[in-house]
Image (spheres, rainbow, N blue to C red):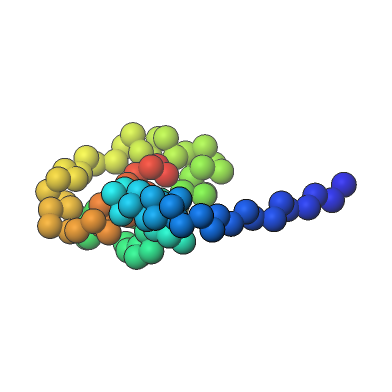
Amino acid sequence: RRYRLAQPRICVDPEVLEALSGIREAYQLSASGGFLSDRCLRCLPPACAAWEALAAELPRLNRLGQLRAKVDTMQEIDAGEALRGAGPEALRRAYLVLGML
């Protein structure tokens, strides 16, 4: 059976669009990506390299059922110290990486 995708509905009501603009600003939402940032870092600062390394292995570890064991044996990283002064893009990247793990 073939499924057809519904056509997107586009709002043109200026009052609604103006309200959405304020909501996007208040919650730092991207107009094109929603909760995903328009500016995403490729990797975290070096102090967080262990997180990035594990995230890079995520598909393989998940497939082998080894992800939990790897996470449990990771050395703790003081996120406050590791990300101090890194800016909002780094915090978003950390949230994304840790959310996957």
Q: Is residue 3 visible?
A: yes
Of residues 6 and 18, which is closer to you in this image?
18
Image location (x, y in percent) of residue 61: 48, 45
> Looking at the picture, does residue 84 appear above or below residue 99?
below
The residue located at (52%, 49%) in the rendering is 60
Q: Nearer the viewer, residue 61 or 30?
A: 30
Instruction: Write the residue at 71% across / 51% down.
Output: 6
Q: Position of residue 31 (x, y in %)?
A: 43, 60
Viewer can see residue 55: no
Please state if 61 lies on the left or on the right of 92 as rendered: right
Residue 14, compared with residue 70, is above or below; it is below
How far from the left and from the top, in percent, is residue 81? 12, 48
> Which part of the image, by quadrant, shows the C terminus?
top left
Q: Is residue 51 left or right of residue 84?
A: right
The residue at 58%/57% (across/down) is 10
Residue projecting furthest to the right = 1
Give x and y (percent) for residue 1.
87, 47
